[in-house]
Image (tube, rainbow, N blue to C red):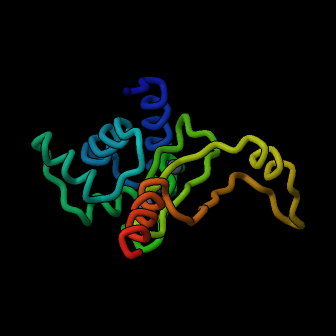
């Protein structure tokens, strides 16, 4: 699902950022942004690279990495490092504050909403600091891995 409004907003944010930083408005940067706007889930550089390649558009992984750094800096995406997996990104537009539940066995990431916790976090005040947003990783075992563990346990007996 492509949200045209958030795409327009992201493009405007990028244009403004490039202007302030005196960086060039290369078509490449906008083409990458277009693809990023079509991503609904977390993605890493390799996933983005494959999607862009499929479209017959060639950019190096280094360019993608640098462009994603730029998008992170101008607030279009957020960067995540889940355990020892490659750096993941997610779009900020339409993102409600969510937790990431990370399975320590298979590395699967599940998103969860916790309105109570968000309310609590939003009410927190820290000395000489203005909170903008927070990010929380919860590590544990996913349902599939828990089932597998149970099975393995049974087989041993
Ligand atoms: Zn798992
Ligand atoms: Zn997420």
Residue 30 visible in the picture: yes
Which residue reaches farthest left? Answer: 56
103 displayed left or right of 50:
right
Viewer-nearest residue: 104 or 9: 104
Q: Quadrant of residue 68?
A: bottom left
The image position of residue 34, as x and y in percent, is: 32, 37
Residue at horizontal 44 percent and vertical 57 percent from the top: 147
Above or below residue 76? Residue 5 is above
Above or below residue 43? Residue 80 is below
13 displayed left or right of 117:
left
Quadrant, the C terminus? bottom left
Which residue reaches farthest front? Answer: 157
Viewer-nearest residue: 51 or 108: 108
Residue at horizontal 62 percent and vertical 39 percent from the top: 96
Q: Quadrant of residue 113?
A: top right
Residue 20 visible in the picture: no
The image position of residue 146, as x and y in percent, is: 48, 61
Number of numbered discs overlaid on the protein picture: 0
145 displayed left or right of 27:
right
Residue at horizontal 56 percent and vertical 39 percent from the top: 95
Viewer-nearest residue: 92 or 17: 92
The image position of residue 21, as x and y in percent, is: 48, 56
Where does ligand 1 appear, by image quarter? bottom left
Quadrant, the N terminus? top left
Viewer-nearest residue: 42 or 64: 42
Residue at horizontal 79 percent and vertical 52 percent from the top: 121
The image position of residue 83, as x and y in percent, is: 47, 71
Above or below residue 27? Residue 131 is below
């Amino acid at each position: 699902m492509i949200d045209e409004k958030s795409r327009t907003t992201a493009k405007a944010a990028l244009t403004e950022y490039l202007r302030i930083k005196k960086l060039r408005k290369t078509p490449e940067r906008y083409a990458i942004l277009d693809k990023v706007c079509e991503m609904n889930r977390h993605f890493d550089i390799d996933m983005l690279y494959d999607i862009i390649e499929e479209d017959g558009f060639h950019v190096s992984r280094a360019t993608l990495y640098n462009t994603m750094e730029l998008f992170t800096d101008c607030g279009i995406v957020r960067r995540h490092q889940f355990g020892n997996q490659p750096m993941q990104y997610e779009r900020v537009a339409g993102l409600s504050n969510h937790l990431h539940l990370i399975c320590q066995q298979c590395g699967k990431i599940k998103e969860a909403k916790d309105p109570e916790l968000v309310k609590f976090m939003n009410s927190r005040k820290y000395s000489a600091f203005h909170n903008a947003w927070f990010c929380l990783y919860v590590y544990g075992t996913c349902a599939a891995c828990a089932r597998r563990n149970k099975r393995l346990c049974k087989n041993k007996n």
